[in-house]
Image (spheres, rainbow, N blue to C red):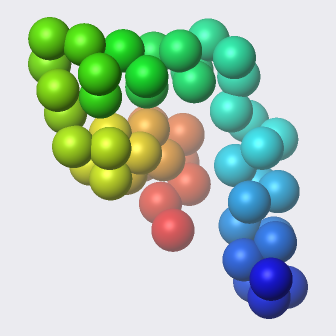
Amino acid sequence: MTDKARDALNSVSRVLTTEDLMALNRVVSGSQKQNPKEAAAAWLKDQGSVM
């Protein structure tokens, strides 16, 4: 893994809560069936961490 990838993952890990992860799981697997990439991008944007 590159340093850049490791830094990106660590940045996300610092702010991703269990509740956030459960909410993301609901939007990609529930009745909404949102695209996982789009759901993750929206979450990052909401966090102010668009990468």
The structure residue drawn at horizontal position 56% and vertical position 54%, both measured from the top left corner, is: 49
The part of the image, by quadrant, that contains residue 32 is top left
Res 31 quadrant in image: top left
Residue 3's spot in the image, x, y percent? 85, 85
Picture coordinates of residue 39, whole percent (x, y): 32, 39
Tell me, yes or no, if residue 42 can be seen here.
no
The image quadrant of residue 15 is top right
Q: Is residue 10 visible?
A: yes
Q: Is residue 43 above or below residue 19?
A: below
What x and y, as percent, mark residue 50? 47, 60
Q: Nearer the viewer, residue 11 or 28?
A: 28
View extreme (front): residue: 29
Farthest residue, direction bottom: 2
Q: Is residue 27 above or below residue 38?
A: above
The answer to whether 5 appears left or right of 3 in the picture is left
Left or right of residue 7: residue 48: left
- Residue at position x 80%, y 83% in the image: 1
Locate residue 11, reporting x and y percent. 76, 55
- For the image, the number of numbered tags is 0
Residue displayed at 32% across by 53% down: 37
Q: Is residue 38 left or right of residue 16?
A: left
Q: Is residue 23 above or below residue 16?
A: above
Q: Who's the residue at 71% across and 67% down the image?
A: 8
